[in-house]
Image: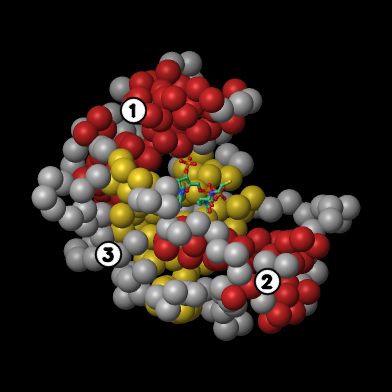
Amino acid sequence: MLAVNPHADMREAVRGTFASLSFHSIDAAEFRDGELDSALGLLDADERQRAARLRPARHRARWVVAHAVQRLELASFLGRNPDAVRYERTPHGRPVLAAPAGGRQPVDFNISHSGDVLLLGITTGGRIGVDVEAWVSDDTADRSPLWETLSEREADWVAAHDDTYAAFVRLWTRKEAVVKALGTGLPDNLPALDVLMAEGSTESLLRAPDGASLKVVDLPSPPGYHAAVALTAPDVPVHVVANAPAASRFSLLP
Ligand SMILES: CC(C)(COP(=O)(O)OP(=O)(O)OC[C@H]1O[C@@H](n2cnc3c(N)ncnc32)[C@H](O)[C@@H]1OP(=O)(O)O)[C@@H](O)C(=O)NCCC(=O)NCCS
C-alpha cells in the first residue's frame, strides 16, 4: 500500500533507541484524483471534524494529506493498521500516541507543516519536537517584532547575516522544536530560551527554562526551508531518512 516507508525501514536498520525524521510533500496539486478522498478516509472522526473547519480548500487539502501521512507512518512504525493508531492530548494540548491499557507508550512523535512540506519525527527515547519553516526574504516586511523573541547574543548573530530573516528563521525553528518537545506551549520569555550554537556546528545541548536538558539538531532541509529537531533524551541518535532533503511523495491510494 505504501510507496515510501522510511521510518519502518529505519527501524529495521537501526537497533536500540533512535529518532527518525522525514520530510514529505503535502502539495495537494501533486495528488491524483482519488488520493485526497483516500487520505480523508484514513482520518479519525476528530481529524475529519478539524479538517472540515479549515479554509481555504488548498490549506484543508494539505492538512488532510499531512495527517494521513502521519497516520500511515506511525502505523507502519508500530506494526498496526492505520485505523488502530489512536491519539490523546496532554493537558497542554500536545498530541501523543495513546498508551496501551495499563502500560506506557514508548514511542513519541511530533509533526510540523509549512508551505508544501511536512516534517515528521518519531522517537523511541524521550520526547521529540520538530519545526519546519519556509523562509522568503522580503526587504519591505517589518520584521522588528520578531527580534523581540531573541536573546541579545542571538540578535547580534542574526544582525551579522546579509539575510537577517533567513538567519532568524534558523534560530526560530530551534526554539519552536524545543517548545514542542517540552509540550508546554510558547513561553512568555522566548529570549531566555537561547538556542545559539557554536559557529559551524549543527547540534548542541541546551538547558530549557525548566532545567531540562535537550539536544537540538539543525536538519538538512528542502530548498527554501529551515528545520530543526529537539530531543529530551540527549543521547538518542538522530537519523534523517535517505530521501531528505527532498520531500518524499506518498501514494495515498490503497
Ligand atoms: C504547538 C505550536 C508551537 C505549533 O506551532 P505552528 O508553527 O503553528 O505549527 P507547526 O506546524 O510547527 O506544528 C503544528 C503541530 O504541532 C502539534 N502540536 C499541537 N500542540 C502542540 C503542543 N502543545 N506541543 C507540541 N506539539 C503540538 C500538532 O501535531 C500540530 O499539528 P496540527 O495542528 O496539524 O494538528 C503552537 O501552536 C503552540 O505553542 N501551541 C500551544 C498551545 C497554545 O499556546 N495555543 C495558543 C494558540 S492561540
The answer to whether 194 appears left or right of 10 in the picture is: right
**Viewer-nearest residue: 108 or 220:** 108
Residue drawn at (11%, 50%) of the image: 102
- In this rendering, the answer to whether 160 lies above or below 180 is below
Q: Is mark 2 within 8 Å of ligand 1?
A: no
Amino acid at pointer 3: Gly
Amino acid at pointer 2: Leu
**Viewer-nearest residue: 5 or 79:** 79
Q: CA distance from mark 3 to mark 2?
A: 29 Å
Sequence order check, earlier mark of 3 and 1: 1
Question: What kind of element bears circle 1?
Answer: loop
Residue drawn at (21%, 34%) of the image: 84
Q: CA distance from mark 3 to mark 1?
A: 27 Å
Residue 125, labelled with which disc? 3
Sequence order check, earlier mark of 3 and 2: 3
Q: Residue furthest right?
A: 140
Residue labelled with disc 1: 44
Q: For the C terminus, which image quadrant?
A: top left
Question: What kind of element bears circle 2?
Answer: loop
Q: CA distance from mark 1 to mark 2?
A: 39 Å
**Viewer-nearest residue: 190 or 56:** 190
Residue 150, labelled with which disc? 2
| Residue 188 picture location, percent across and down | 60, 65
CB contact under 8 Å: marks 1 and 2: no
